């Protein structure tokens, strides 16, 4: 079966570690002692293959490192770096573009400003697709570089304290990275710029899908240690994650929250500071403007940061001081260099030029999919909300049962909506979405409002838990 990489959960932990092993092998064989991070020469295992890079947003590192990776593997590259020169500028849809490009290339790497656009591309082509960043959603290959860097620097990912700095709301690298950190058991310490914290849907997924729960400051043990570290919450994956289940609810998560305490010295040292720039291009006018914090040599003077690796996906603007460039803790240029061996490993694995790295089948998805066209995705940046794509594309959601309702998570951009009404197509009735579902009928239907349910010919029926309509979020 073909393998794509659209979000980080398209790879298992075992596959990620296998990719790291292969990247390490390229580093060992294709670097010199003078420049141990810089791949040189060729290992021409991909000489019969062509890679297409379709970039609809600015890029230096990601596109060049993908292209360099393909060239180092002996393959050829077709490159589109300027959306104005593609047929998208004439109104061509994503679905049509990839059905054309698949005739010219064996693998397509796409960067796009719409969230979920690369998932759509993957659904309309029969060649493998890799997401090089889709709007503010995810950037899984950057996360592979980030985790690889961390593991090389620290020897492990387990129990690391990783401070995330800056624009955590709009930064797609952070959105993929937190899932990776949670899955490998690192602690996530968010230090967002004012008003730019992790989005709710990302926090929800951390606990619901990856068992990574928030511990409040008051439960963190020795508060003296914390007084110097101005954080309110740390996300932690407990030692023994409970079995993932479709019906895990918020109650259970809260219960775990109460039972989990951090050891008193758990945050005495920070293993890595992951700095990000303000994502101006993704902000509405009223969001931008506050003071943006800076990490520099002065900030890193504290005892806690003595061994902190300073990371940044780059490009930097003014959030990371140039005074750190010669500091032994600065690893951001090394992190950028690892983009080549990591992407070589990924290309080789996806093109099946190296066996035993990726399993035949992609990882199993936990949640069933809702396909009825009864409500839109709430995220205006989602690919399903774009006029051009609406000619052939409809919203689609994962059905996620929670404590006393069901929420829908967009399969493209992962934003969530709690519909006001739920019912079944066979009964043609709906009721308020205010109770826990014990099973999932195959003909479930959801509506955002009473009006849309009535228009579709559905009748409202009150339930013992109350018949009131709740408004959708
Ligand atoms: C990042 C991106 O494009 O999201 N850059 C990268 O790919 N290394 C980070 C950013 O632009 O801030």
Image: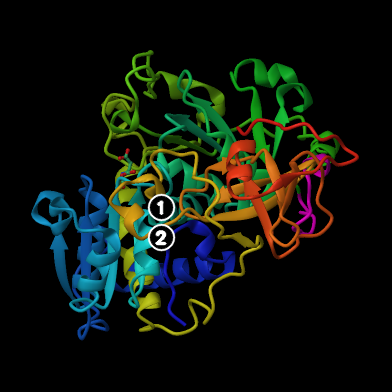
Q: Is residue 232 left or right of residue 191?
A: right
Answer with the quarter of the image where residue 449 lies. Answer: top right
Q: Is residue 37 left or right of residue 376?
A: left
Q: Is residue 179 above or below residue 369?
A: above
Q: Residues within 10 Å of mark 1 (few under 14, many from 20)?
A: many
Secondary structure at badge 2 equals: helix
In front here: 469 or 182? 469
The answer, for residue 320, to whether it is visible in the render is yes
In front here: 116 or 257? 116
Q: Is residue 440 magenta?
A: no
The quadrant of the image that shows the C terminus is: top right
Residue in the image at 34% along x and 34% along y: 327
Read off the magenta span. 239-252
Identify the residue under disc 1.
116
Q: Is residue 249 left or right of residue 158?
A: right
Residue in the image at 37% along x and 17% along y: 286
Q: CA distance from mark 1 to mark 2?
A: 5 Å
The quadrant where ligand 1 appears is top left
Residue that protrudes farthest toward the left in the picture: 85
Answer with the quarter of the image where residue 242 lies. Answer: bottom right
Q: Are marks 1 and 2 in contact (CB under 8 Å)?
A: yes
In front here: 167 or 124? 124
Residue 27: give x, y in percent of width and height: 34, 67
Identify the residue under disc 2.
119
In front here: 94 or 395? 395
Residue 450: give x, y in percent of width and height: 64, 37
Q: Is residue 139 left or right of residue 227?
A: left
The answer, for residue 161, to whether it is visible in the render is no
Dot label at residue 449: none
Residue in the image at 81% along x and 42% along y: 435
């Amino acid at each position: 079966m073909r393998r794509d990489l659209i979000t980080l959960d398209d790879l298992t932990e075992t596959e990620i570690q296998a990719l790291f092993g292969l990247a390490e092998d390229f580093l060992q064989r294709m670097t010199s002692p003078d420049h141990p991070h810089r791949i040189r020469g060729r290992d021409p295992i991909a000489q019969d293959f062509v890679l297409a890079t379709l970039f609809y947003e600015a890029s230096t590192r990601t596109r060049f490192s993908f292209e360099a990776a393909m060239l180092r593997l002996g393959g050829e590259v077709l490159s589109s770096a300027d959306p104005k020169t593609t047929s998208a500028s004439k109104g061509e849809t994503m679905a049509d573009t990839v059905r054309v490009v698949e005739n010219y290339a064996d693998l397509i790497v796409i960067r796009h400003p719409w969230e979920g656009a690369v998932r759509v591309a993957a659904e309309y082509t029969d060649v493998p697709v890799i997401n090089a960043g889709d709007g503010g959603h995810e950037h899984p290959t950057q996360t592979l570089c980030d985790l690889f860097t961390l593991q090389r620097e620290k020897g492990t990912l387990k129990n690391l304290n990783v401070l995330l700095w800056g624009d955590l709301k709009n930064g797609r690298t952070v959105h993929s990275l937190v899932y990776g950190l949670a899955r490998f058991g690192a602690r996530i310490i968010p230090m967002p710029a004012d008003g730019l914290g992790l989005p709710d849907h990302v926090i929800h997924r951390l606990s619901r899908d990856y068992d990574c729960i928030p511990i409040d400051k008051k439960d963190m043990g020795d508060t003296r240690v914390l007084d110097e570290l101005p954080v309110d919450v740390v996300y932690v994956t407990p030692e023994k994650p409970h079995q993932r289940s479709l019906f895990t609810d918020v109650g259970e998560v809260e219960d775990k929250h109460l039972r989990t305490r951090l050891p008193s010295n758990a945050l005495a040292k920070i293993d890595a500071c992951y700095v990000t720039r303000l994502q101006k291009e993704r902000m509405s006018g009223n969001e931008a403007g506050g003071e943006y914090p800076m990490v520099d040599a002065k900030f890193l003077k504290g005892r806690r940061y003595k061994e902190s690796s300073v990371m940044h996906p780059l490009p930097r603007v003014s959030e990371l001081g140039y005074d750190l460039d010669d500091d032994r803790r600065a690893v951001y240029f090394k992190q950028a260099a690892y983009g080549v061996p990591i992407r070589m490993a990924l290309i080789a694995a996806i093109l099946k030029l190296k066996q035993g790295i990726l399993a035949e089948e992609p990882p199993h998805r936990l949640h069933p999919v809702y396909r009825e066209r009864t409500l839109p995705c709430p995220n205006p940046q989602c690919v399903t909300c774009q006029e051009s794509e609406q000619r052939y594309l409809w919203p689609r959601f994962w059905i996620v049962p929670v404590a006393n309702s069901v929420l829908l998570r967009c399969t493209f951009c992962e934003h969530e909506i709690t519909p006001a009404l739920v019912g079944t197509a066979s009964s043609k009735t709906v009721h308020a979405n205010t109770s826990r579902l014990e099973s999932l009928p195959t003909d479930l239907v959801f509506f955002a409002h009473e009006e849309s349910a009535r228009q579709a010919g559905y009748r409202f029926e009150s339930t013992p838990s109350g018949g009131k309509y709740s408004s959708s979020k």
